[in-house]
Image (cartoon, grey):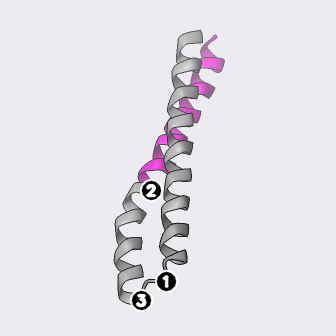
């Protein structure tokens, strides 16, 4: 079950990397001074990726806990 812990940790790190990417993309959009409609369009593109990144992080943490519990 040790492999499950490492796989879960890798999935969690991937999710966190995607979260950081989302944060940087929105920060870049804010700095570029987009008008309101363009900013809304950019956020509409980022929100699904952000939700997926959170889901990936949660699944990874669940795998880690499961691996520790079964070990």
Residue toward you, 12 or 64: 12
In this picture, which residue range is highlighted in magenta? 51-71
Residue toward you, 27 or 65: 27
Magenta includes 61? Answer: yes
- Image position, residue 40 (x, y; %): 39, 80
The numbered mark at residue 35 is 3
Q: Considering only vertical position in the picture, is 62 above or below 52?
A: above
Q: Which residue is mark 1?
A: 33
Tell me if mark 1 has few (under 14), some (14-19) or many (20+) residues whose alpha carbon lies within 10 angstroms of its own: few
69 left or right of 21 in image: right
Q: CA distance from mark 1 to mark 2?
A: 25 Å
Residue at image coords 59%, 34%: 61
Magenta includes 19? Answer: no
Quadrant position of the C terminus in the picture: top right
Residue farthest toward the front in the current orientation of the protein: 32
Are the two marked residues, 1 and 3, in contact with CB atoms closer than 8 angstroms? Answer: no
Tell me if mark 3 has few (under 14), some (14-19) or many (20+) residues whose alpha carbon lies within 10 angstroms of its own: few
Q: Is residue 1 visible?
A: no
Residue at image coords 64%, 19%: 69
Q: CA distance from mark 2 to mark 3?
A: 24 Å
Are the two marked residues, 1 and 2, in contact with CB atoms closer than 8 angstroms? Answer: no
Q: Considering only vertical position in the picture, is 45 above or below 20?
A: below
Chief secondary structure of the magenta portion: helix
Element under disc 3: loop
Q: Is residue 30 visible?
A: yes
Q: Quadrant of residue 68?
A: top right
Q: Considering only vertical position in the picture, is 7 above or below 42?
A: above
Q: Which residue is mark 2?
A: 51
Sooner in the amino-acid sequence: mark 2 or mark 3: 3
Element under disc 2: helix
Number of marks drawn? 3
């Amino acid at each position: 079950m040790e492999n499950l812990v490492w796989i879960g940790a890798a999935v969690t790190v991937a999710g966190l990397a995607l979260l950081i990417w989302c944060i940087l993309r929105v920060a870049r959009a804010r700095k570029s001074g987009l008008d309101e409609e363009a900013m809304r369009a950019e956020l509409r593109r980022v929100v699904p990726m952000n939700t997926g990144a959170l889901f990936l992080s949660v699944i990874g943490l669940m795998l880690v806990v499961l691996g520790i519990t079964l070990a």
